[in-house]
Amino acid sequence: MSKPWAKRDGLPGDYYLPFHLMDAAAAAYMLWDNYLPLGVRRWLGQELGLTEPRTRDFLAFLAGLHDVGKACPCFQDQWPPRNSADYRSHEQVGYLSLPTLLSDFAGLTDPLVDSIAHRIAEVVGSHHGEFQPTQRRHVRRAEGDVLLGGPAWHAYRRGIVDTLRQLIGPVPPARLNRPTAVVLSGIVVLADWIVSDTKWITNSQWKAPDALQERWDHTLRAVRKRLMGLGFVTSSSTARITTLVLVGDRPNALQRSIEDTFRPTGCGILLISAPTAAGKTAAAMVAADRIGHATGRPGLLMCLPTQVTTNAMWERARGFGYPPSPGRGRVTLSHALATAYPPYRHYCADDEALRWLNGPHRPLLAESSVVTIDQLLLAGLAIRFNMLRLFALTGKTLVIDEVHAHQPYMLAVLGRVLSWCGRLGVSVVLLSATVPAHVAGELTAAYLAGTGSAHPPPVEAAGYPGWVWHAVDGSFQKPTTAERTAMSTLGARTARIKHVRYPMGTRTSTILRYARRVREEGGCVAIICGTVPTAQKTFRALKGSDLDDTRILLLHARLPHRQRALTEAQVERMFGKHASRDNGRRPKRAILVCTPLIEQSLDLDFDLVVTDLAPIALLIQRLGRCHRHLRPEEDRPKSARVPTVVVLDPEGDRVPAQWLKLHSGYELRATRGLLMTRPADVVIPDDVDQLVQAVHDLGLSPFDEAAAAEWRGRHATTTFERGLARLSAVPAPQLIDDLAGMTHREVRDTDATTRLGIDDALVVPRWTDSAGLSWLDSAHTVRFPEGEVLTGRQISSLIDVSIRCPATWVQSLDTAVPRWKHAFLCDARVLPLPGRHPLVVDSDLGLVNGLKDDNL
């Protein structure tokens, strides 16, 4: 038997297998000392029934075992091929061999499927992101199985295990349940990744001592240095937000209540429900800091509904006491185009740790992260490496903003994630201005059920405005009576939701009436359209009208990436918190035509908002973008001194078909009925919760028999979407009976669905000049990449011009697309010349589909 190897590609030669296993064990050892927060270390020790030093030893032993399956003929000879019936992957070999190699760990339970040795084998077998199917277990055959190498290789594997035992001295845990095994799997995956870098092996390990103890001491030092370079250092103190976040601002009643009364003693779930612009985010930062201090888990994960809101929140989070410093304090940004966002790209440019953390599956590993909700939901889907995502949550407090803004499928998956948070001791803060009572109750109940309590405590309502904290021990906290009274005036004002019915086909002329007021009186107006084609048509009509001295902007999701980013930045400058006439940023006359991109978490302020009909919760969100900041009265047009949302709704009983693709028919009709039967004036905050529950609470009776049919249909749709979520989600922690159910081998993470019904594609335009050369722009200044291998500059240029659209629009282009070797661009489709396809890239409108229009 030749000297078994573990790594080969990119190295001066074969890297000895036991050395790689020692490297991984050292990585787990150092992760425990330098990265795992105190609260996570305590939790793992309690779960395993070991002291913290013994837990560290056991964790290092686990990581050291991860590649023991490479001691087999299939890996060492790289034969037979992977698609052969006789092939055994090294993950599978480790999974099948370890129960007999660790027979003294088996305990008194069934060694086949439920012993500690079997659970260790499951952890080892999952280090490439997938748990092994239990039916592959054949413990009695492991030693003599020819496909595993027979007795000789089994004896060698036993020798490796004995060497690791001698080096580390692990003690078997008293117990090893499945949820804990999932977290351990995530740590093992991370340890393996850290020490698998060929450059690090060459520079640090290639000439390390061969003697066992000397090499171990050297490797511990080398791995610790690598961890420091990659930013895997957890802050020793969590007291950094409470006194920082409110500096310069006078705290309002909500923030004072959290600061004065909220005193968590352990983990739990907090719901903060208050009007828009009520400072919920600042209150959440104070709460998260308190929770982190109480639980010993100082990290932060903020989740938002869209890329634009996530980008804006990342900018804010960098100022919430998280300045980057050597070894800690980095704030990662994660969504599909995060690394193409210029401020984040600049932030990461000279930081090796951030470049590493931006790799696949890694951004959540940072101490602080700001992500789209999709990145969190992936932890709840049965896909590869969800164990790494779940582990990444354990050291953090999870803050979910705009929790109301998700469809039933997403809420069902979110509920599954929250149940795992409850089981893993991860605290959660939910924020919303318009959350339906049943949604808040179901999410809180899912969290409490995950804790494993036989009798979960009843769910308390937060009140509006207000907050409520449910601790895992069954206790809860709420504001005092005096604080509730003070909060009852939070954001107090009288606003107006004006319902305007217009004859079908006259929507444009109706909007022009409001636009001409801007020309006459001045002011900043947002026109929120339900769909991109409607926004494009509205913008084109306004640009072609008599509004020559009015600035008109267009923002939607089908603008080329760079154009959209520049427009978003321009919108923030013109209508944001710091825009004023005095500093020249806020224009005298301006109209923003947009889709609902702006309704959540963006700090924009308009004098008037005109919007297509939408469910009442969204209308209230849009009302929050009207008179959001205090300005001198003379800065507002005379006709817009009262904050007003004008809701455009075509006459008749029919709801336009394009709106039904976006919202529940029942909620649209219920909102219409509500607006037609109540006064336009809305008292904030008194009326908000009543309006939301009237339309969105599943338990309330519908308006009439016609609405009852819609209501029953909504129940059916909700039930269907929740059923789909159950099929694609991981098992609930309290119900999991086989770790193989955590990962579905046939589903790639790139195929995972976090937003039901969203099936989009990436398109890249191609322009051709008279000489037949291809370009990325109509001005013919940037060449179109023809090869499969791309330079960094070519990748940036492609991302700059790329546009998202429904996949059905470009199905005919699928076979003619080059497969660029880049994670974001590998499935991009190339648009042909204008005139050869209905899709056209217009310099003002973005991507236009000539076959799609609206009849509003």
Image: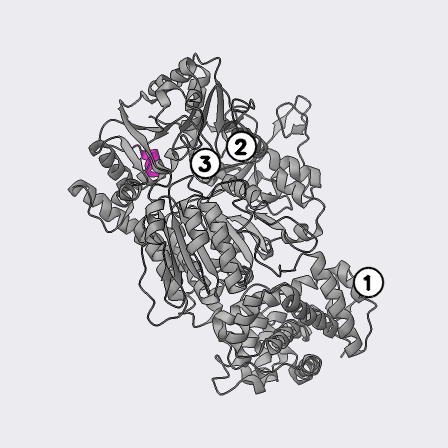
Q: Amino acid at mark 2?
A: Glu
Which residue is most to the left?
A: 705
Q: Amino acid at mark 1?
A: Pro
Above or below residue 423? Residue 175 is below
**Disc number at residue 12?**
1
Quadrant for residue 196, please give it.
bottom right
Secondary structure category for the residue under label 1: loop
Which residue has dot 3 on it? 597
* Magenta segment includes 121: no
Secondary structure category for the residue under label 2: helix
Instruction: Mark 2 and mark 3 in contact? Answer it, CB < 8 Å.
Output: no
Q: Classify residue 835 as left or right of residue 323.
A: left
The number of discs equals: 3
Near-viewer residue (448 or 760): 448
Above or below residue 326? Residue 6 is below
In magenta, the rendered stretch is 656-661
- Where's the C terminus, which quadrant? top left
Disc nearer the start of the sequence (2/1): 1
Disc nearer the start of the sequence (1/3): 1
Task: Return the x and y of residue 184 as percentages of the image width and height.
Answer: 56, 69
Task: Return the x and y of residue 754 as percentages of the image width and height.
Answer: 45, 50
Task: Return the x and y of residue 387 as percentages of the image width and height.
Answer: 53, 63
